[in-house]
Image (cartoon, rainbow, N blue to C red):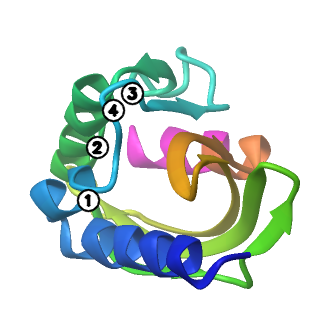
C-alpha cells in the first residue's frame, strides 16, 4: 500500500477521534459513501449515506450520541482496491452512560490513493445488546 494512502487513513482516524469533521472531510471526495451494517430498527443512524455531506452529517449525529474515547485501527491491509482494518473502539452512549467496547471491521474502497467509500461492519449481536441496555 502506498505510504500516502496509509498516511491519509491514519489522518482520517485521528480526525475521527478528535471529532474534527472539517479535517476528516478534507480527505473525502464529494461522492464519498459510508455504510453501516446495523439494522435501522436497532440504530436509526445506520444504513447507507451517499455523498460527503450526508456521510459527515451522520458522523456529526453519531458524535452527538456517542462519546468515542478510543479508536485504534489495527494493521491496514491492502486487498485489491480496498483497505481493510479491524478497528478497536470504546465509546459511551451519552444519554445512558453505557459503554461499548468492540472491534469493528472497516473496509475502505480506494481510488487513485484516496478513500471513496467506507463500509463498517459491527458484531450485530453485541451491538444490539448494547443498544437494548442503553435504552433501559
Residue 133 lies within the magenta run = yes
* Whole-percent x, y for residue 41 in the image: 54, 15
- Asked whether the residues under the numbered discs 2 and 4 touch, taking CB atoms below 8 Å apart as contact, a structural biologist would say yes
Could you give the CA–CA distance between mark 3 and mark 2, rounded to whole angstroms? 9 Å
Question: In the displayed image of the protein, which residue is found farthest to the right?
Answer: 79
Which image quadrant: the N terminus? bottom right
Question: In the structure shown, which secondary structural element does the residue marked by tag 4 occupy?
Answer: helix
Q: Residue 101, position in %: x, y? A: 57, 73
Q: Earlier in the sequence, mark 3 or mark 4?
A: 3
Give the residues in magenta: 128-136
The residue at which mark 4 appears reads as 55
The residue labelled by disc 1 is 24
Residue annotated with mark 2: 59
Q: Within the magenta stretch, is there residue 72?
A: no
Q: Are marks 3 and 4 in contact (CB under 8 Å)?
A: no
The answer for how far apart the CA atoms under marks 2 and 4 are is: 6 Å
Q: Are marks 3 and 1 in contact (CB under 8 Å)?
A: no
Sort mark 2 into few (<14), some (14-19) or many (20+) by Cα contacts within 10 Å.
some
Main SS of residues in magenta: helix
Amino acid at each position: 500500500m502506498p505510504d500516502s494512502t496509509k498516511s491519509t487513513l491514519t489522518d482520517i482516524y485521528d480526525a475521527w477521534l478528535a471529532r474534527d469533521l472539517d479535517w476528516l472531510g478534507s480527505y473525502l471526495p464529494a461522492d464519498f459513501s459510508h455504510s453501516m451494517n446495523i439494522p435501522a430498527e436497532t440504530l436509526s443512524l445506520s444504513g447507507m449515506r451517499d455523498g460527503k455531506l450526508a456521510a459527515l452529517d451522520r458522523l456529526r449525529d453519531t458524535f452527538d450520541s456517542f462519546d468515542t474515547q478510543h479508536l485504534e485501527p489495527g494493521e491496514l491491509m491492502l486487498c485489491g482496491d480496498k483497505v481493510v482494518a479491524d478497528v478497536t473502539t470504546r465509546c459511551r452512549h451519552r444519554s445512558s452512560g453505557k459503554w461499548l467496547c468492540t472491534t469493528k471491521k472497516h473496509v475502505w474502497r480506494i481510488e487513485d490513493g484516496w478513500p471513496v467509500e467506507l463500509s463498517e461492519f459491527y458484531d450485530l449481536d453485541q451491538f444490539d445488546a448494547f443498544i437494548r441496555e442503553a435504552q433501559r
